[in-house]
Amino acid sequence: MRKITGLLLATALLTACLAAPAAAEEPDHTYNYSYWREAEPAPLPYTAERTINGSDLGIGEFLNPQDVYVSSDGHIFIADTDNNRVVHLDETGDLAGVFDGFDNEGKADAFNKPHGVFVDRNKDVYVADTQNGRVVRLNESGKLLQIYGPPVSSVIPRDFQYFPNKVSVDRTGRIYVVAKGAYEGVMEFDGQGDFRGYVGTNKVRFSPADLFWKRLATKEQSSRMQLFLPVEFANLDLDDRGFMYVVSSEANAAAPIKRLNPGGEDVLRREGYFDPVGDVAALRVSGDQQEAVANAGSSTFGDVAADVSGMYSGLDTRRGRIFTYNRDGSLLYQFGGFGMTDEAFVNPTAIDAQGDRMIVLDAGLNRLVIFSSTRYGALIRTGVKAHFAGRSDEAARTWEQVLQLNANFDIAYIGIGKALLKKGENKTAMAYFKNGNNRKYYSESLDRYRSEYVWNHFGVIMSSAIGLLAATIGGRVYWRRRKPAVHYIDNGVWTTPLRTIVRPFSGFWEMKYEQKGRAWIALAILLLLVITMIVKRQYAGFVVNFNKPDELNSLDELKFIVLPFLLFCVSNWSLTTLMDGEGKFRDIVTAVGYAMLPLVLIFLPQTLLSNLVTLGEAPFYYLLDTIAYLWFGWLLFVGTMTVHQYSIGKTVLTLALTAFVMAFIVFLGLLCFSLLQQMLLFVKSLYREILVRW
């Protein structure tokens, strides 16, 4: 019996393990954002290689660590804040030393809540000793070299309390400090510790309403109001060229990440689909399903890490995610998130790059996580490095491998297109740029391909053009000679619409008073306009076409063309019957239909030509739009005035009132629809209540 019972228990256990839901496993993918700002699944770029706790190192648990820095030789330095120490690890993550005190002119000294750490190329360690209000410089063995105290300057407020949070040093020895309450920007000190000024001040953001009330308030009321102060920086990092990356922990900031040149100007490139702001639409990924959730707020960056080849990463402390961008500001990948697994965090406070690894400090779990790149992440980094170094063919081969892992990675299409463009394969490059939704380089490749095509087929093009011109002139001469001389031409119903758009006053007069207008022709023009708009939205050139293909719906044209047409006709007829208008409903329909003919005549050739224009020529495309709508508006005005026999002023008033009546009808329709919907819900709930009580 014992054997049978044990066998049954083992079988049940094995069955339970095999039947465990797959959703309990960690997802093997993250997401990236498309051109349409939609989060699309992407392979994981990084996985946790090693997790380091203080107890594993034999020095006791970390307590609220706030900063991590990777030196040029790959060593890791941690500002273990609440333990009042700096922990030194070698490149593999093993303990190399602890700085918990130093000799200061014969006296024992120690840190007090250090929040920042930096190591220069001489291996000197700079510590932002926050609560002591100083920056301490030690050599690699922990010997004190220098102490930099509070700044002394006339521009510093008298009541300013100096609490340095982060520190960084450039190649010339200048020291940059992010201090609490330093709203003017990053503090700059020279090598001797003398204060030189501020770098990169954030702009003040305020509400116009707040400014208005502050202008009206008394001095006492104004003093109690919130001050208009710029947001202080949260962290900084220097790249290999001496440019400073800074981040601001501000919600909905227009530029949360900046790259400052030595003059303090922001020179960060923002040429991607969207600016480097972290999440543009939150997506929760769990198991094998993706659930879109409302964006509860913008990303808030707490740290930034400069990387090689123009790449940089920002730490979103709001959602615990790390976003990596290339030098153009295009998102390469993101990973992380809140959770208790090795790949997730509870309260990430700092990041830094260690070659192709990423170091993340989690103060919530008091641990350091070393991430190594997956094949997907490594290929992306290799492609970026090759492109940055000008090795376009190598980059293209790498991007091809990336597309095998993620066919939705637009940057790979763009990278391959650049390589093809460099080799002169312009037509193929156009296809890749179109897949990558990059209109700038698509336009450049189109311009080159167009010039190449004209050059190669110049003889055929010129012969065809001359032949067509000769045939046109000859046909016109022949027609004039064969045409009998007449003194009066009676325009029929078919030519009336064309005559109307050229000579609107006489055309609309003939349409109404000589009975040459036909409502069915007007409705045919309306149908042609619907077909034209469908063709335009779907087949306009890529340079000027910003419609999302999977959202195109031909029925939408009924809402945007047919419905306004009917609303205008009904509203105008209802209004003009009260304002002594002579036009009947059929006349109004005919006049509006004839007025829409220029839209058809312009939009069809415009759609064809749009496939040949570049970005520099796109204004001519939009100029045709303007001409078409102005022409339509002019014909609608003349048609209304002629049909109803109004003066100019009365026509303007009638059109304005017609627009108001249209809006009123729409409002009544929405109100009736809402009431009907509520009635149906009431009847449905009542029916359910009866069924329950039955």
Image (spheres, helix red, strand yellow):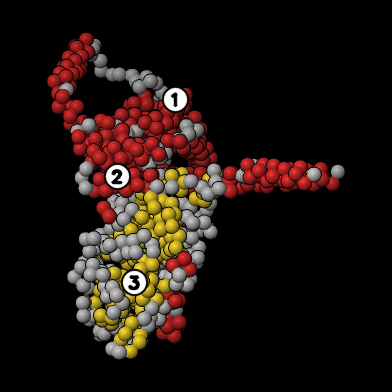
Q: Which residue is mark 2?
A: 383
For residue 577, say whether it is visible. no
Q: Residue furthest bottom?
A: 106
Q: Where in the figure is residue 523, as x and y percent of width and height?
A: 46, 27
From what the image shows, is residue 488 above or below residue 172?
above
Under mark 3, the amino acid is Val
The span from disc 2 to disc 3 (Cα, nearest Å) is 32 Å
What's the mark number on residue 524?
1
Q: Residue furthest top?
A: 482
From what the image shows, is residue 51 above or below residue 686?
below
Q: Quadrant of the C terminus?
A: top right
Side of 392 where 673 appears, left or right:
right
Say what secondary structure mark 3 lies in.
Answer: strand
Which numbered disc flags the more N-terminal residue, 3 or 1?
3
Q: Are marks 3 and 1 in contact (CB under 8 Å)?
A: no
Say what secondary structure mark 2 lies in.
Answer: helix
